[in-house]
Amino acid sequence: MTILKLKPSCKDYLWGGHRLKDEYGIEYDGQVLAEAWEIFCHPDGPSMITNGEYAGKTLKEFIDEMGMEVLGTHCRRFREFPILTKFIDGRDNFSIQVHPGNSYALKK
């Protein structure tokens, strides 16, 4: 199998900056780039495959087609791809966020 290259989903929150574009070369046309979601399957920002026979498909579409087995043995127990990998450029102050515990998050 070929290594999949992914295009991130870019988020332009008000507190974002320019470092992800300027220093890391992430392609984005907006004014500010707050987050680059590099590996993710959520509908609000799925990673897009950019190479090989799956180019143009989302990571979720690839996993749905190939099966969870393609992710290895530890991900088989999950219904969905359980990881969000992202880079953040916080030029301004962040908001305070409270994230749910694992048991609540898995239920919801």
Image (cartoon, helix red, strand yellow):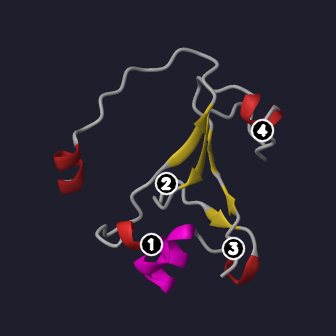
Nearer-N-terminus badge (4/2): 4
Residue contact at pointers 4 and 1, CB within 8 angstroms: no
Distance between the Cα atoms at labels 2 and 3? 17 Å
What secondary structure is marked by label 2? loop
Residue at 69% x, 71% y: name it: 3
Residue type, label 2: Asp
Answer left or right for 23 relative to 2.
Answer: right
Q: Earlier in the sequence, mark 2 or mark 3?
A: 2
Task: Work out whether residue 23 or residue 56 is closer to the camera in this orientation and state it.
Answer: 23
The mark found on residue 24 in the picture is 4
Task: State the residue at coordinates (17%, 55%).
Answer: 107
Which one is nearer the viewer's eye here, 92 or 69?
69
Identify the residue position indicated by label 3 in the image. 56
Residue at the spot x=24%, y=38% of the render? 100
Q: Separation of disc 3 and disc 1 at Cα?
A: 23 Å
Is tag 3's residue or tag 1's residue first in the polypeptide sequence? 3
- Give the alpha-carbon distance from disc 2 to disc 1, as whole Å: 25 Å
Q: CA distance from mark 4 to mark 1?
A: 29 Å
* Distance between mark 4 and mark 2 Cα atoms: 23 Å
Picture quarter with the N terminus: bottom right
Q: Is residue 17 magenta?
A: no
Q: Secondary structure at mark 1?
A: loop
**Highlighted range, magenta:** 59-71
Q: Which residue is mark 2?
A: 44
**Residue located beneath label 1 in the image:** 72
Q: Amino acid at mark 4?
A: Tyr
Measured from the top left, where is residue 95 in percent x and y? Answer: 43, 20
Mark 3 vs 4: CB contact within 8 A: no
Q: How many marks?
A: 4
Crowd tier of the residue under label 2, counting other residues whose Cα lies within 10 Å: few below 14, some 14–19, many 20 or above: few
